[in-house]
């Protein structure tokens, strides 16, 4: 989506093609790329892009 303006506040509800499978794929890709793991509780707390970024930062220290 070249014309999509991604912000820290962007949530899944704002992305028409987003579904639970997309969410799982994104989390798995982030975990692989950054060599980190999120608990189910951490994943459930992520409501927007900013939450994901913050969670990655927390894991990487």
Image (cartoon, rainbow, N blue to C red):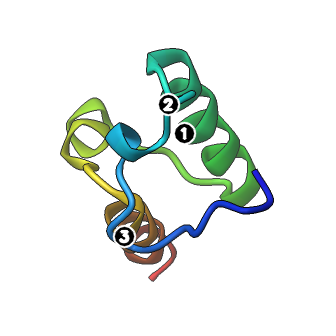
Rendered location of residue 25, percent (x, y)? 63, 28
- The quadrant in which residue 35 appears is bottom right
Among the two numbered marks 3 and 1 on one chain, the one whose residue lies closer to the N terminus: 1
Front residue of this view, candidates 54 and 16: 16
* Residue located 32% across and 68% down the image: 9
Pointer 3: what residue? 50
Q: Residue furthest bottom?
A: 61
> Do the residues bearing badges 3 and 1 touch, measured as CB atoms within 8 Å?
no
Pointer 2: what residue? 23
Q: Is residue 2 left or right of residue 31?
A: right
Pointer 1: what residue? 27
Rendered location of residue 3, percent (x, y)? 73, 62
- The quadrant in which residue 57 appears is bottom left
Front residue of this view, candidates 37 and 45: 45
Q: Is residue 33 left or right of residue 15?
A: right
Front residue of this view, candidates 46 and 59: 46
> Do the residues bearing badges 2 and 1 touch, measured as CB atoms within 8 Å?
yes
- The quadrant in which residue 34 appears is bottom right
Q: Residue furthest top?
A: 21
Q: State how many labels appear.
A: 3
Asked which secondary structure carries label 1, the reply is helix
Q: Is residue 14 left or right of residue 22?
A: left
Q: Residue furthest right?
A: 2
* Residue located 39% across and 41% down the image: 12
Q: Residue furthest front?
A: 3
């Amino acid at each position: 989506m070249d014309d999509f303006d991604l912000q820290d506040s962007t949530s899944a509800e704002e992305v028409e093609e987003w579904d639970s499978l997309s969410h799982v794929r994104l989390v798995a890709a982030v975990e692989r790329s950054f060599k980190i793991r999120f608990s189910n509780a951490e994943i459930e707390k992520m409501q927007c892009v900013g939450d994901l970024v913050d969670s990655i930062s927390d894991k990487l220290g």
